[in-house]
Structures are given as structure tokens and as C-alpha cells.
Image (cartoon, helix red, strand yellow):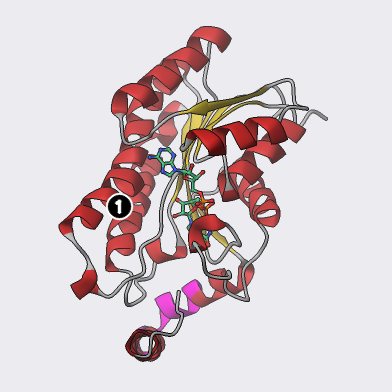
Amino acid sequence: MADVFDGKICIITGGTSGIGFAVAEELLRRGAVVYAVGIPEEGVRAARDKLAGYKHAVCRLVDVTVYEQVQALVDDAVSRHGRLDYMFNNAGIGGTVPFEMVTLEYWKKIVDLNLWGVIYGVHAAFPVMVRQGSGHIVNTSSIAGLLAPPYQALYCATKFAVTGMTEALRYEHAYRGIAFSTICPGNVATPIFGGLEPPKDSIPPEEAARIILDGVAKKEGLIIFPEHYRQMYLEMKADQAKMDAFMAAMAEERRKAYETGGKYY
Ligand SMILES: NC(=O)c1ccc[n+]([C@@H]2O[C@H](COP(=O)([O-])OP(=O)(O)OC[C@H]3O[C@@H](n4cnc5c(N)ncnc54)[C@H](O)[C@@H]3O)[C@@H](O)[C@H]2O)c1
């Protein structure tokens, strides 16, 4: 039986590194046509080199904070292939920082990328999918788009927004054959941790990609992983006192790490 992604036309933003790159490669392995886009130019070039063995890989420089670039990307995919089956809005940056250190410039940067970048992707892809009467929009949120860890106010502001938007659209447009999924990863070992070593419980991006695509193939709404994060989410959602105790302990730990110049995530 053919793979569900075989021959499908897919766009993945932030597809030149980390989770996005791993999803792009897994899709290519499974027979899809993949536009893996991102910034900067060197990252795009490196991704193009790594994917050179796949006939249907297209790596491009696309800044998702510029709507015209996102629209042009979707237009190009549709004019070449006549359709767009999957739009993965995955590009994003982290933001774990004491609130008093956050500048308005950083607020703007993270909202422009993590939220407007996703809105632009949805806005450009949705009309194509409505015309087709099919398609699947997959937006990357985070476990921090479901639970609100201290010192992550900026990141949570963007990721809760992505989760809420995607869930609302999922219910609104199921009737016309358009699916929406929200990806909610815990820790995955990618460049998102900057200079820091990824947390010990991180999973490799390739494993994340397989979990994501399994969930997408089943048209799951919320794809929460790794499993211990999914369990944690379910437990905390069911027990507010447990959540409060957990977050209070994390706040204390992170505050101490800041005060002593130690590392934290
Ligand atoms: N790694 C984790 O532990 C983790 C956990 C939860 C959520 N996430 C989310 O997963 C997504 C992917 O992150 P990652 O961990 O693979 O990190 P990453 O840094 O490897 O990937 C981020 C990608 O975003 C792209 N990007 C950045 N600015 C861009 C812009 N203006 N236009 C287009 N692309 C841009 C980069 O090119 C890069 O490919 C992000 O949305 C992130 O918030 C990651």
C-alpha cells in the first residue's frame, strides 16, 4: 500500500534545520515533494546539500515574517504542482528569560516569527485548500503552548496563540475536508537551545519527525510528545494543585539559576 505522503505536495517552514529538517527528510523518504524553507542563506545551502540525493527536494530562502515571501512560496508550489496538500508552519524561536530582561524589540521579534509567521502560512495556504476541498495545515506549537512554565512568558504567549488558533480552525473547517494539527513537542535536541547542551530528556529530531508524521497521517488534532510529556500534560490538566506545585518548584529552580549565573532552559 502506498504511503499516505507519497506524491503529496508539502511545504515546511523552518525546514532547513532541527525538527523541520527531519520532517522534510522523512517526507522525502516517504515519496513526497517537499519545499523546505528557512533562513539564513547558509542554512538553506547546507540543507540543500544534505537533501541533494532526493529528486523532489526544494530548499529555498523564505522569511516567514514577510507575508509576500510566504504567499510567493505557496503560489509557486501550486503553479508547479497544481495543488498543496500539507502546509507545515514550523519556523520558530525559543524565549526562556526573566520577564524584567525582555525588551519590546524581543517581544516583537518572537511574536513576528512564532505567531505572525504561522498566521501568514495559514492565510496563504487556506484558500488553496478550500478550492481543492482538501489539505492539511500543521502548526508547530509546544508543550509550552498547553502548559505555562515560568520564565517563558513570551514563548507561551506565542505558542498558546498558535494552539488556540489551530484548534479553533480544526473544528471550524473539518466539514470541508481540511485538517488542522497542532504539534506540541517537549524537548527535542535541536539548535533551538543555542549554545546550551539540550536537556537530558531530549529526543533526537528524527524520532520527533516520525512521531509528528504518524500523528499527521492519523489527522490527530493535538500531537503531544515525547510520551512522558504527554503524560505530564494529562496529569497536570486533571490536577491543578499538582500543576501549581510543579510550576512553583520550577520557578524557584530557574530563579536560583539566574541569580547564580547557572544554566537553565
Ligand atoms: N526543540 C525543542 O525542544 C522544541 C520544543 C517545543 C517546540 N519547538 C518548536 O519547534 C519548531 C522548530 O524548532 P527547532 O527546535 O527545530 O529549532 P531550530 O532552531 O533548529 O529550527 C528553527 C527553524 O526556524 C527557521 N527560522 C527562524 N527564523 C525564521 C524566519 N524568519 N523565516 C523562516 N524560517 C525561520 C530556521 O531557519 C530554522 O530552520 C519551533 O517552532 C519551536 O518553537 C521546539
Nearest the eye: 28 or 61: 61
Tell me if 148 is positioned left or right of 201 in this view.
left
Question: Could you tell whether 25 is left or right of 247 in the image?
Answer: right
In the rendering, at what x and y percent does residue 191 appear?
54, 56
Look at the image and tell me in which quarter the N terminus lies: top right
**Residue drawn at x 60%, y 74% as measured from the top left:** 228
220 w.r.t. 5: above or below: below
Q: Choose top left, top right, bottom left or bottom right for residue 139.
A: top left
| Occupied quadrant, residue 74 | top left
Q: Residue furthest right?
A: 1
Residue at image coords 32%, 36%: 65
Q: Quadrant of residue 218?
A: top right
Q: Is disc 1 surrounded by few (<14), some (14 to 19) or many (20+) residues within 10 Å?
A: many
Res. 168 visible in picture = no
Residue 114 covered by magenta stretch: no
Between 173 and 42, the residue placed more toward the observer is 42
- Quadrant of the rendering where the C terminus is positioned: bottom left
Compared to residue 260, the image places residue 5 above or below, namely above
Locate residue 43 relative to residue 217 in the image: left or right. Answer: left
The residue pinned by badge 1 equals 110
Q: Amino acid at mark 1?
A: Ile
Q: Is residue 238 magenta?
A: yes
Q: Residue at x 30, y 55 (%)?
A: 158
For the residue pair 218 and 262, the one nearer the viewer reads as 262
Local SS, label 1: helix
Q: Residue 146, position in %: x, y?
A: 39, 64
How many numbered callouts?
1
The part of the chain drawn in magenta is 233-241
Q: Main secondary structure of the magenta part?
A: helix
